[in-house]
Amino acid sequence: MRILLIFCLTLGVVLETSAQGSKTIRIVNDHIVRKNSIVKFKLKAAGDKEDIYLIDKDKNKYPVQFLKDGYACAIMSLNPGEVKTFKTIRESVSGSKAEVLLTEAEAKFTVNGKQVIGLQTGKKDLPAEIEPVFRRGGYIFPVLSPSGLSVADDYPLNHKHHHGIWAAWTKTEFDGRQPDFWNMADKTGTVLFEGIKNTQAGAVFASLESGNAYYDLSLNPNKKVLDEEWQIKVYNSEGDEKPYYVFDLELKQRLSTSSVLKLPEYLYGGIGFRGNGEWNGKDNAYFLTSEGKDRSNGHATTSKWVHISGNISGKLSGISILSHPDNFRSPQPMRIHPTEPFFCYAPSQAGDFEIRPDKEYIARYRFIVYDGEPVPGFINRMWDDYANPLVIK
């Protein structure tokens, strides 16, 4: 099976060039196969930033998208040890792109006009069976495969506080109290969506930043404990091999007061995923970890990645969740539910820890969604690229 790969290279400077006139950029790859990778490099743009290409010696053109930090990105493929030289040209950029469409209820990410994911704001109507205490925003739903299948669920009746891809802490201690930000029915803690900013769209990716606030509800008035920032980036990666979607999530948590948030050892809490409702039942969802474990033996073990899949309307589809090696306690321990399509990277399984006023808690994950069987070699290659960004010198 041949599968297309998109990878965000977080480091890389070949040459600081000006897009005014043609300049040369030279890229030397390392030992990793990089298929349709996102390469980051320094580039000064004069005038419009939406009409710059890189062009190689074979006249192949690669659209450039500018970041907000003075760098630019382009998608290209590189073999191990390959050297590529490009010129910059100015030309109207046309063709496919990734976009963010904003409504009151949702930020919708699309690639080539097809929705990939949505970020929920908490403004949509609740199902009749869901009590208001469970209302939640600031999570990713839906999560769609290239064939349009929804691999995630929202407000499932057997766990009404589960939402597509979301984050929360469960067992906590804060100023002598124990707010639970995960199990919202307890009414001791909650997470509120605060807003969206810095949206960006283009030929390479679409992105936004959003904010959540963690509140201790055991006080009157309620007390904010954490400010959480999400950065979501969806890549224009539908591809010309096996179709798949790729998106990244980086979350940062900062204490809102000078008090310490203690996180005692516990079964779950962190970043969670809830799979399609058809995957309920111990034989309807399939789990595969980077260590070759499954639902029967994967719980409370550690992994670099996990793939969760199942049949939706008779067709197999799934999601790979890659944990960045810089994450706290990497490779992180996992909660794999024995009968429900629920997964969580849970660093608190490995023992007590704290979020302190002098240091942010940062976690990064990459998600790959595609139809069909999971291929461990492909997922390993994806993780290797995610974990080992190309350094361009």
Image (tube, rainbow, N blue to C red):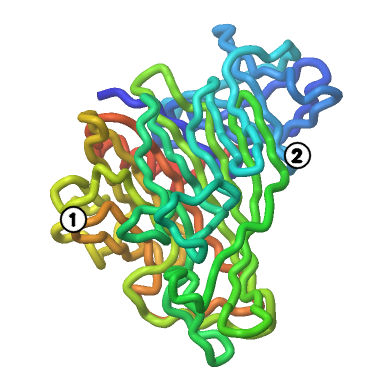
Quarter of the figure with the C terminus: top right
Residue pointed to by mark 1: 295
Of residues 122 and 347, the one drawn nearer to the viewer in this rendering:
122
Name above or below for residue 93 compared with residue 42: above
Identify the element where label 1 is drawn.
Answer: loop
Residue at (62, 29) in percent of width and height:
99
Residue at left 40%, top 38%? 368
Whether pointer 2 and pointer 1 mark residues with C-beta atoms closer than 8 Å, the reply is: no
The disc labelled 1 sits on which kind of residue? Arg
| Position in image of residue 386 (x %, y %) | 45, 44
Q: Quadrant of the rendered structure where residue 325 is?
A: bottom left
Circle nearer the viewer, 2 or 1: 1
Which residue shows up at 54% across the image and 39% down it? Answer: 9
Q: Nearer the viewer, residue 265 or 91?
A: 265
Disc tally is 2
User: Which residue lies under the disc numbered 2?
Assistant: 70
Q: Is any part of residue 393 visible from this angle? A: no
In the image, what residue occupies the spot 49% across and 38% down?
117
